[in-house]
Image (spheres, grey):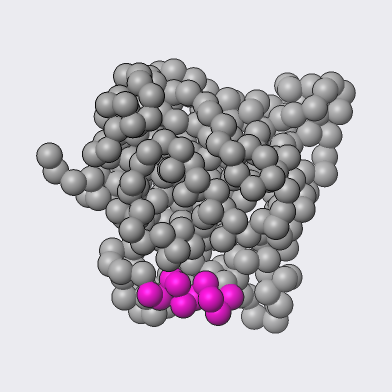
Amino acid sequence: MTLTGAAGYRTMGVPVRGGELAAGVWERGSGEPGAGGPGAAGVPTVLALHGITASHLSWPAVVRAVPGIRFVAPDLRGRGRSNALPGPFGMPAHAEDAVALLDRLGIERAIVLGHSMGGFAAVTFADRYPDRTSGIVLVDGGLPLPLPAGMTAEEATAATIGPASARLSMTFPTHEAYHDFWRAHPAFSGRWNADVEAYVDYDLVGEEPELHASGSIDAIAEDSAQLQGDAGYLDALEALEAPVHFLRAERGMLDQPGGLYPPDAVAQWAARVPALVVHEVPGVNHYTIVMSDVGAAAIAGVVRTLIPSR
């Protein structure tokens, strides 16, 4: 295993509104886009969109689980090495950045894979660029978050992503201190591995003793306001053509039972969105559904069904 997930990993930058979008690309062999190498037309491609405070290094376990195809994964605007890109943020901005990445690589169509908030960006991408979308996979995201009784949408969102957002305001004296923070996180207790460590190290920017997470507080705040789904988003979700695969983690962001999406809430969305195909993934939480071999295998199984036979 390589630390970045598979052979053929490289990083790149793409000109977008306000600067340069950073991305990771995993592909076999070498060659320039459009020159008959990995960028050539016809190579099965996954466009992988990460969660609200994450980066492209969420995906190495999934890359390893689906060998032989290309994965293209941006650091979404306001995160990772794209953290200096300005607003406005929001799902349309992420979709626009993602299509610029595909254009730069000469990729006509891709399976769009989104985790958590990346699922919302994936739905928006598929709605705006249907001719660039060859399949849709939502991983514990993309369905508007359930609204608990007595809570406003703003209160519900704050309660859900509050711990992740709070981390953005913290500083850490050393990289090891940041490791300790994540090792103690309920989602990763007893689940620490090389992928998680690489993800954590990549997230940390600045200089000792004032290291901090790379995500932009403004970006997270603006994007989180869209996780309940406005009317336009709901229209886009309901209009998607079958199949739209949704993988549900049985445990939540803090490894709590019930998950980010309780089963009854998912059942309601399945009744409302005819294209939705639900896959239950036991033994994982909201993070480890993408950052563990068990979760990655479940995602890979769905992705394989969307790859055309040769």
Query: Foreground residue, 244 or 186?
Result: 244
Query: Foreground residue, 217 or 282?
Result: 217
Which residue lies most toward the left here? 310
Q: Is residue 235 above or below residue 213?
A: below
Which residue is drawn at the image coordinates 48% and 66% (left, top)?
A: 143
Q: Is residue 255 visible?
A: no
Which residue is drawn at the image coordinates 27% and 38% (left, top)?
A: 41
Q: Position of residue 208 (x, y in %)?
A: 84, 21
Provide the major secondary structure of the magenta segment: helix
Q: Position of residue 307 (x, y in %)?
A: 23, 45
Instruction: Find out whether residue 235 is within the magenta segment.
Output: yes
Specify the segment rendered in magenta: 230-239
Q: Position of residue 73 (x, y in %)?
A: 48, 39
Q: Is residue 16 above or below residue 125?
A: above
Tell me where residue 78 sits by quadrant.
top right
Which residue is drawn at the image coordinates 42% and 56% (left, top)?
A: 138
